[in-house]
Image (cartoon, rainbow, N blue to C red):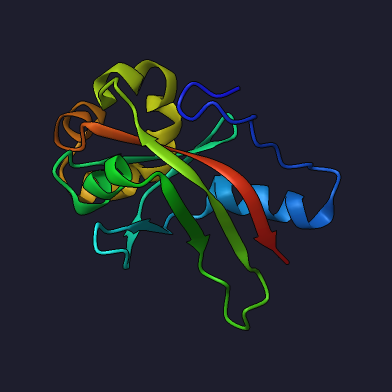
């Protein structure tokens, strides 16, 4: 069970070609589209940096961001990666999300090195190190997938 949603942990089977490709993309892609539901019922989709970590997708966010407010009001979310030039690499995750009660600064020991390795150039371009990132993007959204659509 996951701490954030109480649902069974989501796993991708590296022996399955489609799931292995989805896993590789979740570990390497820089941008995902995170879709949450507004109070009005309309979807809100934004590009995000993310980290695939222990079967969850983690998004560091400014605490006042619309996506944080939306997740607090409705746990249903969708995350998808770009499909590639010919649409040949579809990866869509459906699931639930929760805002961690622990701020980003509490996650740094667990995810900081991996996050910095993935986004080091982007962080440098923003003149941020991991401590600065944790201070500005202090909310951690934990997305627990329940369904993968991929090919």
Front one among 18 and 95? 95
Figure quadrant of residue 18:
bottom right
Left-right relation of 81 to 35: right
Left-right relation of 147 to 48: right
Percent coordinates x, y for residue 43 in the rendering: 34, 65
- The C terminus - image quarter: bottom right
Left-right relation of 22 to 109: right
Q: How many numbered circles does the render carry?
A: 0
User: Which residue occupies 51% across, 62% down?
Assistant: 81
Front one among 58 and 70? 70
User: Which residue occupies 21% across, 37% down?
Assistant: 137
Percent coordinates x, y for residue 74 in the rendering: 35, 47
Figure quadrant of residue 93:
bottom right
User: Which residue occupies 42% across, 26% down?
Assistant: 111
Q: Is residue 87 above or below residue 39?
A: below
Q: In the image as oriented, which residue stretches furthest toward the front? A: 40
Front one among 141 and 23? 141
User: Which residue occupies 58% across, 74% down?
Assistant: 84
Percent coordinates x, y for residue 110 in the rendering: 43, 19
- The N terminus - image quarter: top right
Left-right relation of 99 to 113: left
Percent coordinates x, y for residue 32 in the rendering: 44, 58
Q: In the image as oriented, which residue stretches furthest toward the right? A: 15
Q: In this view, does 51 lie above or below 109?
A: below
């Amino acid at each position: 069970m996951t701490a954030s949603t109480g649902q069974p942990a989501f796993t991708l089977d590296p022996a399955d070609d489609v799931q292995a490709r989805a896993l590789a993309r979740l570990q390497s892609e820089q941008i995902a589209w995170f879709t949450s539901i507004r109070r009005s019922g309309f979807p809100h989709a934004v590009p995000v940096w993310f980290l695939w970590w222990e079967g969850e997708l983690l998004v560091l966010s400014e605490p006042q961001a619309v996506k944080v407010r939306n997740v607090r009001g409705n746990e249903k979310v969708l995350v998808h990666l770009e499909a590639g030039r010919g649409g040949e690499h579809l990866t869509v995750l459906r699931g639930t999300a929760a805002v961690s009660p622990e701020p980003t600064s509490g996650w740094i020991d667990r995810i900081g090195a991996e996050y910095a390795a993935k986004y080091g150039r982007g962080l440098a371009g923003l003149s941020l190190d991991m401590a600065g990132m944790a201070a500005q993007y202090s909310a951690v959204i934990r997305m627990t997938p329940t369904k993968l659509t991929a090919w």
